[in-house]
Image (tube, rainbow, N blue to C red):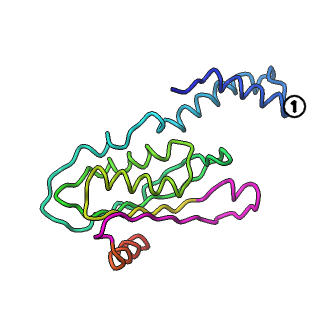
Amino acid sequence: MMDTKKIEQSVKMFLEAIGEDITREGLIETPNRIARMYEELLQGNNEDASQHLSKTFKVESGELVLEKDITFSSMCEHHLMPFFGKVHIAYIPDGKVVGLSKLARTVDTFAKRLQLQEKMTSEIADAVFDCLTPKGVMVVIEAEHTCMTSRGIKKMGSKTITYAARGEAMNGQKKAEVLSLIKN
């Protein structure tokens, strides 16, 4: 569980350290607002993705399922700055599928933590692969990192793309098919 009082104290110390008057009207409630904000932004720390992926439905088809353009925002663990973008999840069922909203909830579970995009990509792929036991799964994430666009090198509009694939069925030809479907 998050210690919001400690966060409030830390924010007060930070504001004082940068020369702000923490008693001025605009800042009086800021430490509490920041604590509540982090509670919301990091709520994935208290969730287990398997709770979302456990409700499945039987299917006969083993055809590709692709849910694309699942929007997310997360916090970079290196700079505590946001990164945001889209997640695409493709899998080949082996007798069961999950409700589409559950894939989006799984993305949120991992995005709502201090995170690295590369790690988040693998965590989502592992969760889907472990819980649904599909023939194959592929996760692609496209994101813009504010630690790169608004500070440091300041390259607005640059995107980072990561992907992770699991299972033998997600071979070179199937990967190419998934990437083509994501582009369109």
Q: Residue at x 60, y 24 (%)?
A: 4
Quarter holding residue 95: bottom left
For residue 152: magenta?
yes
Name the residue at the front extreme.
Answer: 168
How many labels, in total? 1
Q: Which residue is label 1 attached to? A: 19
Q: Residues within 10 Å of mark 1 (few under 14, many from 20)?
A: few
Q: Looking at this rendering, what residue extends furthest in the right direction?
A: 19
Q: Secondary structure at mark 1?
A: loop
Vertical side of 180 occupied by 70: above or below: above
Q: Going by the image, does 13 lie left or right of 123?
A: right
Percent position (x, y) of residue 29? Answer: 69, 23
Q: Amino acid type of disc 1?
A: Gly
Residue 28 picture location, percent across and down: 74, 22
Look at the image and give the residue range highlighted in magenta.
144-170
- Name the residue rendered at 69%, 59% in the picture: 149
Residue 88 in the image: above or below residue 73: below
104 to the left or right of 27: left
Q: Quadrant of residue 13?
A: top right
Q: Nearer the viewer, residue 164 or 146?
A: 164
Q: Position of residue 106 (x, y in %)?
A: 38, 47
